[in-house]
Amino acid sequence: MTQPFIKLENIVKKFPGVVALNNVSLDLYQGEIHGLIGENGAGKSTFIKILTGVHTPEEGKIILKGNPIEFENTKDAIDNEIGCIYQELNNIPQLSVTDNIFLGCQLKKKSGLLDYEAMHKKSKELLKELGQNIDPTQPIEKLGMGHQQMVEIVKAISKNIKLLIMDEPTSSLSETEIKELIKAVRKLKNDGVGILFVSHKLEEIFELCDRVTVFRDGQHVITGDVSAFTNSLLIQNMVGREITQQFPKIEFEKGEEILRVENLTRYGVYQNISFTLSRGEILGFSGLVGAGRTELIRGIFGADPIDEGKLYLNGKVVLISSPEAAVKNGFALLTEDRKTQGLVLGASVLSNLVITCLCRFRKGLFLDYLKINNAVVNNIKSLQIKTPGPDTLAEQLSGGNQQKVVVGKWLNRDAEIYIFDEPTRGIDVGAKVEVYHLMNKILEQGKAVIMISSELPEILGMSDRVIVMRSGNITAEIERGSSQFNQEDIMHASWKDITVLESKK
């Protein structure tokens, strides 16, 4: 198409203390997959909300199919054939697949009753078009995350969407689900739908997109054909500087054993898990979604019950029956879901940073707020948290800066064992490197890190040793420097049949 489906010219959007978008212009076409990348806080989310009618710009124009337009709300955007699938899916878990697809636009019989027969039929047809054999009558909460994502796509195309915005669509998907999603996105492109594909995963941008745009600090930096870029050139445009090492691993001398896990079992979830962790070491846990890694860590941290097994800290048996007991014994858990489990979103950056260590700031019966404020200002500076101030609410920060606050609150607690569950999910390349530097600092202090990650480059880049899990069992333990310390062997162990493994023992 010679004419863009939608054109944004010189868009400016401001919030208190922040210029979120500054003179941003961009053209989007039907039948094109357009990548949008940038660091957390670059303005991507605000741009999406301008496109979908959530926010109204203070300055600039929106031109749709050659005509100026203003979106007053999200319905305006949908009525003008623009849809969005957000990173946190917008579905109602208890309702059926069909009810979610036709939410707000149900088909009715002449009698005025809902025509479920027609809606189920249409839902099945739309799902089949994307290669999905999903029963439209079942509750959506029974589906895996990948299939829920597909339902969101069907919900959008059922409204004859011509531009579909996908915000970090693969962040919670397995490798198999990602392949299905990529196949569906390509089909939408061939059907003439324009896709704005927002992702922190540069490999997806190169695999999928025709063009790519980079935002930095609320400004448009560059737009061009994907073929004109290299990985390092995109990163340089994103962060404004060259990042020579995506994984700044420092190998420290392994110290004494700090943690030993013996035959840990939770019936039906994981079985006979044994491993050790030493000071100065990053122990990586790899495996497919559903391998039992997060469940195992929750058991160690006392968040879920354990049926059998023992934990040893510094050579002594400990009983950890609750997260409170885990924290008292020197554990820190940076959860997979920072928004619901890692932060108090409605509280300030200051409150979140000191929430685990208020006892340090007591002055008699009261808190020493001057001391708290000084400590938090130092945290913000040392962790390079981008925030207008300590009183800013955590929910107003970008994902990368929220993650730094979670790390900061545990650093303030001065734990001994730091457990990072998917530490860089949903954050940009620059913020990832900063998280890795923080891990190095933890090791430098003679402490230890357990890292769960679904990103193999991250596992290989930062781990001293890798434990691979499948179906609640350990299938491999691989040392850094070993000939098996590579992506292919780790993936092979992730798929390994447990019965075959046991028969070889």
Image: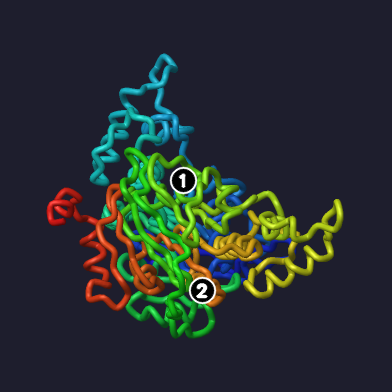
* Residue under the point 23% across and 60% down: 493
When asked about the image quadrant of residue 234, the answer is bottom left
**Does dot 1 land on a helix, a strand or a loop?**
loop
Q: Position of residue 396 (x, y in %)?
A: 65, 57
The Cα atoms of the two marked residues, 1 and 2, are separated by 36 Å
Q: Position of residue 198 (x, y in %)?
A: 44, 62
By what rule are the colours in the image chosen? rainbow
Q: Amino acid at mark 1?
A: Leu
Which residue is identified by label 2? 443
Q: Quadrant of the C terminus?
A: bottom left
The answer to whether residue 491 is seen in the rendering is yes
Q: Quadrant of the N terminus?
A: bottom left
Q: Position of residue 416 (x, y in %)?
A: 55, 64
Label 1 packing within 10 angstroms: few (<14), some (14-19), many (20+): some
Label 2 packing within 10 angstroms: few (<14), some (14-19), many (20+): many
* Residue under the point 62% across and 54% down: 55
271 on left or right of 84: left
- Depth check: 352 or 40 in front? 352
- Depth check: 347 or 132 in front? 347
Which residue is identified by label 1? 89
Relative to 156, say whether 14 is above or below: below
The answer to whether residue 220 is seen in the rendering is no
